[in-house]
Amino acid sequence: MDPVFSWLVLTEAALAEVYSLTAEAVADDPELAAFAARLAADERGHQRFLLQMAQGGQAPGEAEISSREEMAAIDAIIGRLRQLIASPGFCRQKLLALLVELEFSELNDIFLATVQAASETSGQFRKAAAEIQEHIDCIELFLSSRPDTAPLLDTVRRMPRIWRENILVVEDEPVVARLLQSVLRAEGNVEIAANGREGLEKLGRKYYRVIVSDIDMPEMDGISFYTRVADHYPGIGRRFLFFTGGDLSAERLGFLQEHSLRYLLKPAPIQSIRAAVGAITHDASAPSVRPH
């Protein structure tokens, strides 16, 4: 394995370890501890992704990814974080600042080139790229909930986007479909299917983080569409948002409740639609659609 790529693999392992130690060091702050533990789990996933690249012969050569200065800088930040959490009564704001500095440094040209190269070759690696972007979004979401983190949030928001989520809108009314496409454009790349049958075809070809579906549609309605998809992707219900007319029958309501499916009734405020989709994209427990 190329020495620079080997360093990337070892760095992900070191990050997972230091974040786990951080979670233990801040056990008196459950939210911060859970956040650090989440980062540790993510880094272990990044390491698995890199190892899968190596096993599949996808690891780039040293000529493509080499920057000794960046490597040394990241190693130094990890060392500073280790020293900080080993110090009694350390400052939590300084801890958060080091975490952000480390994450910002980790997303350097070496790592970005590696992820980009892999995501262009395989659906499996595109899924990994989406998970890395979710890792960044998780940091931003956590910092937004803490006081006095505005400068750190600015840094996180300047991090390069590795992935824009794909969103599938399954809607037979063109006006409504175009409206949803416009409303959700800021959330990711939005594609449209005119009915459940078209939706199935698209899901067979691409990874979609969120599926927004009407119920009443020609050829294949939303309930049949969901049932067919769920047969192939168990657990995908957490990715679904039904956006349907206000005349929801007791039978349909019972189906949605039985399967714990999110839904909004038409018409709905734009902010409610965005919030509902955002809740899905930030749901770490929602399993991904495996791309083909």
Image (cartoon, rainbow, N blue to C red):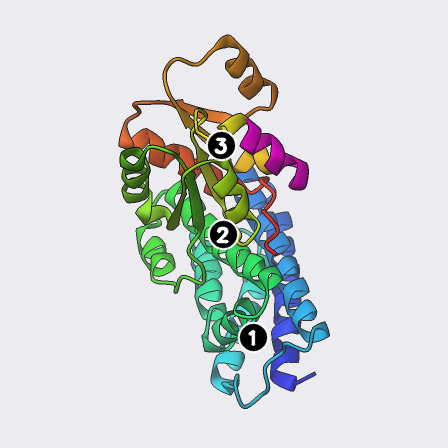
Q: Which mark is residue 75?
A: 1
Compared to residue 29, the image places residue 15 above or below, namely below
| Residue on which the image places disc 2 | 134
Q: Which mark is residue 219?
A: 3
Q: Which mark is residue 111?
A: none
Compared to residue 254, the image places residue 292 above or below, namely below
Mark 1 and mark 2: Cα distance apart in space? 24 Å
Q: Position of residue 261 (x, y in %)?
A: 53, 26
Residue drawn where x is 43% and y is 24% of the image: 216
**Are the residues at dot 3 and dot 2 in contact (C-beta closer than 8 Å)?**
no
Residue drawn where x is 43% and y is 46% of the image: 167
Mark closest to the chain's N terminus, 3 or 1? 1
Mark 3 and mark 2: Cα distance apart in space? 35 Å
Residue drawn where x is 28% and y is 27% of the image: 269
What's under tag 2, amino acid-wise?
Glu
Mark closest to the chain's N terminus, 1 or 2? 1
Mark 3 and mark 1: Cα distance apart in space? 57 Å
**Helix or strand or loop: what does disc 2 sit on?**
helix
Report if residue 232 lies within the magenta region: yes
The image quadrant where one finds the C terminus is bottom right
- The magenta-colored residue range is 224-235
104 or 200: which is nearer to us? 200
**Are the residues at dot 3 and dot 1 in contact (C-beta closer than 8 Å)?**
no
What's under tag 3, amino acid-wise?
Glu
Decide: few, some or many residues near mark 3? Use Cα within 10 Å; few <14, some 14-19, many ≥20: few
Compared to residue 130, the image places residue 246 above or below, namely above
Q: Position of residue 6 (x, y in %)?
A: 66, 79
Taking the image as shown, residue 33 lies to the left or right of residue 212, namely right
What's under tag 1, amino acid-wise?
Asp
